[in-house]
Amino acid sequence: MAPDRELATAGTRSPRHSPSARSSSSRHRTDRSDPSTNSRRPLTKKNVPRGRIISIFVVIAFVYAVLGARLFDIQVSQKDQYQEVGLAQRFQSVVIPSERGSIFDRNGNALAVSVERMSIWADPRVIKNPDTYARKLAPILGVEFNGLANSLGTKNRAFVYLARQVEPEISNQVKKLNLAGVGFTPETKRYYPAGDLAIPVLGFVGTDNNGLSGLEVDQESQLAGKPGKMSVEKDPQGRVLPDSQQRVFEPKSGRDLLLTIDQSMQYEVERVLVDEVTIAKAKGGVAVLADVRTGDILAMANVDGAITDVPAHPAKAGSANRALSDVFEPGSTNKVVTIAAAIEAGLVNSNTAFEVPSALMIDGTKFEDVHSHPSQLSVADILRISSNVGAILIARTLGADRFDAALRLFGFGQKTELNFPGEASGILLPRDQYNATSMASMPVGSGLAVTAMQMLQVYLTIANGGISVPPRLISATIDANGERHKKPLASSRRVISESTAATLTTMLEGVVSDGTGTKASVAGYQVAGKTGTARKPPYEKPPYRYVASFVGFAPTEAPRLAAIVVLDEPQINATGGLIAAPTFSRIIQYALAVDRVPATS
Amino acid sequence: MRQKLRNAELRLGLLVVLITTSGYLLVQLADKPKLPSDLWLFLGVVIALYGAAHFAVRRLAPNANPVLLPLAAFLNGIGFVVISRLDRDLARNQAAWTAAGVAAFIITLALVRRIRTLERYRYTFLFIGIIAVLLPLVPKLGKEINGARLWVGIGPLNFQPGEAAKVLLVIFFAAYLVDKRELLASGTRKFGRLILPDPKHLGPLLLVWGISILIMVRQKDLGSALLFFTVFSTMLYIATDRVSYLVIGGVLFIGGATIAYQLFDHVQTRVSTWIDPWPVADGKGFQIVQSMFAFGTGGLSGTGLGLGNPQQIPNAATDFVFSAVGEELGLIGAVAVLSAILLLVGSSFNIAIKTPRPFSKLFAGGLATILGVQSFIIIAGTTRVIPLTGITLPFVSYGGSSLVANFVILALLMRISDDTARAAAEQPSRTAHALPQ
């Protein structure tokens, strides 16, 4: 590529040049158009840069060929990939929420239902005058004008919620305004018709209707169902195209739950418990009422004690179901386990007499009886007057191994079959970690902790002739077609012999008829049960805090109903016999009436 | 001879009328199964427009190349059909602009009777051209649309003076290079294998580079800058045979582009969405991804006119008109359009080769390069071969300024072609030498 190739070739050129060049008025042109005077000549003929123009065109043709190849690549070779992604992207799927199952009590009263509510949203891009809109909408939605105007004026957003799950009259009012860019989406809202009734058992759901606590989360798989899917073709602005293909996968409704809870019993238990918590100025209380033969939980109440200006009341949504989640040292109610094991082992019967001192010193700790009593007591007496020393003596006869085995056999230290969300296992030392005082404290119900349900389970077993029927809250599910699917009873197991159970029942009857639990009696029925009063840690420092309880069942000749009442930190009459027993009495009395259990006397 | 040329042009034109009207009919039938009420009106208008251009050529440039007008009309027709499918309002405007373009075509042929007339006013054109480039930067007059400040708005009318500047500056540059090509060709400085001309002769080159950088930086229009620069570097090369100008041009452009990349987010976005648009397919990469989907959906034979979804692509009528063609007419349609453009560019280069006059040669070469490079930039952008830079596809895209400018370019090419043929006819003995061998 010699720099002067043009000059070099110029000499061989023909002197001819075009007439138009000659006639050009350009000074330079005239100079150069005469080959005889100047070797720099116009680009005529031979020095026409044909090669260069052709090479430029060749380059352009080449890049066009590349474009053609690229088109072939996109449109033929990789076609499927682009088509598939393209279609998938044009068809956006919209989730159609499934209808969440309802929750009914054992008589079919609705405790939790889902109702359709409109959520109101807006497309700010469409809205020209956010202020005008806000002025119209704010009073209807009951929100502040400024906030609403701001969200309506949000730039670059295609969707803002104005209000979620509003009442029908509100959404209807907004619909009547007929505002462009304001849309409605049906959503379901969880609604609890009975208010706070049994709410810690039922639990609650989040905004998206997913269970967050209680049975709502425990039974999520049953209740939720399967959301459906709708494919809609959308334009680049995300608006659904009219006449666009819609491929719908129908949502599958969730199943309804039929609970064992009896709404009226639950109500009564809560009411009675609130009264007692109020009178005792307790921090709170729980009560559980169950059917002896089936293990069905008929009521499970959690009550919050009064604080400054709020009176005692049934626990609100979001509260733990303390009957299952909280543990306490049971106190004397635990004595039956020691005695049951001793009878079962053939070591004692109800008449076996023990020489019972009023106090025992064990490893530097003094264990004493609350009530003064004769020095000789039968096993039945020990239970009736709740003698700690007597219980410790029986446990000594029994020995730690058999005692420990009995505790576990009755279900302590492990969750119940309910396996409720947040349920506690209780605290039970492993056998090899028993210390010097364990065999003194545990037989009388301290040094171990149980849930109210666990303790009720012990008495349910005794009431049921020694056979433990696992408790349950759900008796059946009802599918979308209305078909009922009964939940089979969990397999029961024998814990103690029938005769041991009968012996214990008789002894427990004595507690109510002539012992610490006389206030638990119910006119017309034979009631069996046991009081419990335990000090809460820290034990040594006043003010002393107690847990007072009563657990029992009725009628004794053919037990039908069992209940436990536990009062947390009562400040007045802080013993199981004085406050928990009367509450138990009222609960059992009501339940016996509702269940039409015939009176015995 | 001239009769034969013009009759060929007329026959090809009738084919174009048939294709355009059929396309329009298909678009309308896809909408509803009824013959459009304005079908005959449409046919009449298409015939009238083509007829007007054709008979103007018969009168004003009877010896001109007979394929340029039909090719341009074909591209214009396909473009109109696709635009009418995308947006009826845009189609109405485009029809008006097509009429304006044809008018500009006839006026250009009528005013520019000899191409050398233009050579005489080179500095006037340079002056007007520079003003045209700068016009969008004038406060209040200039408008920024889609991140690029290319527009001048007077009342409701927006136009891109850059389209006119393109032609004006090519005229100046062709004339200037004819004068200075020897000076520019003789190297005085050597850098390794590169031989550079004396810096004092580099003035105009640097001026054009400056204009390009200005377009790039001030108007944020990478596509036009690339076009300007490629065209002028190519013209320099044609004039001087020096590859070094292409190298220098390339280096200068890359330098400018790097600066633009550093300075402007939207340039960085264009590059990153070119490399991988998928992570931002719903956002910044939406347009290019939609374009890919359109091509993919079209496949070999296309969805059929009116049966695809090209309206999903933002700016489908302007920058992305080729993607719409690709979706509805498939690879076959896209390659047809690509081939028509290449034929148009090739014919234009052929005109440059045939013409004996240096100015015409450079001018025609420059115009041919404009058509070729501009089409490449936008087609390669929409197919993700190069980063996307918004620029119109000549004759096909929606856009008044572009359409009118391209019709003027067409008229000028045909004028050069006519000049050459007439000169050859007047001096038959020289024809042999003027023809390619």
Image: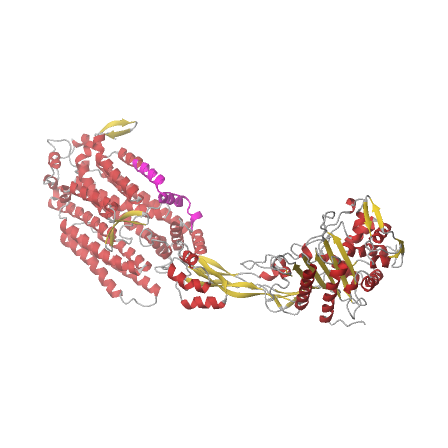
A164 over B269 or under it: above or below: below
Identify which residue, B229 or A214, lies in the foreground: A214
Q: How many marks overall?
A: 0
Q: Quadrant of the C terminus of chain A?
A: bottom right
Magenta segment, principal secondary structure?
helix
Residue B291 placed where, x, y %?
38, 51
Q: Quadrant of residue B386?
A: top left
A108 over B242 or under it: above or below: below
**Is B275 within the magenta?**
yes
Res. B100 in view: yes
Q: Which residues are magenta?
A: B252-281
Residue A247 placed where, x, y %?
48, 62
In the image, taking residue B393 as reference, residue B181 lies left or right, namely left
Identify which residue, B186 or A585, lies in the foreground: A585
Residue B208 placed where, x, y %?
24, 39
Res. B1 in view: no
Residue drawn at (72%, 69%) of the image: A590
Q: Quadrant of residue B200?
A: top left
Q: Quadrant of residue B264?
A: top left
Residue drawn at (46%, 66%) of the image: A171
Q: Quadrant of the N terminus of chain A?
A: top left
In the image, taking residue A102 as reference, residue B193 lies left or right, namely left
Identify which residue, A416 or A240, lies in the foreground: A416
Q: State the scheme by which the image is colored.
A: secondary structure
Residue drawn at (80%, 52%) of the image: A443
Residue A476 placed where, x, y %?
66, 65
**Is A403 within the magenta?**
no
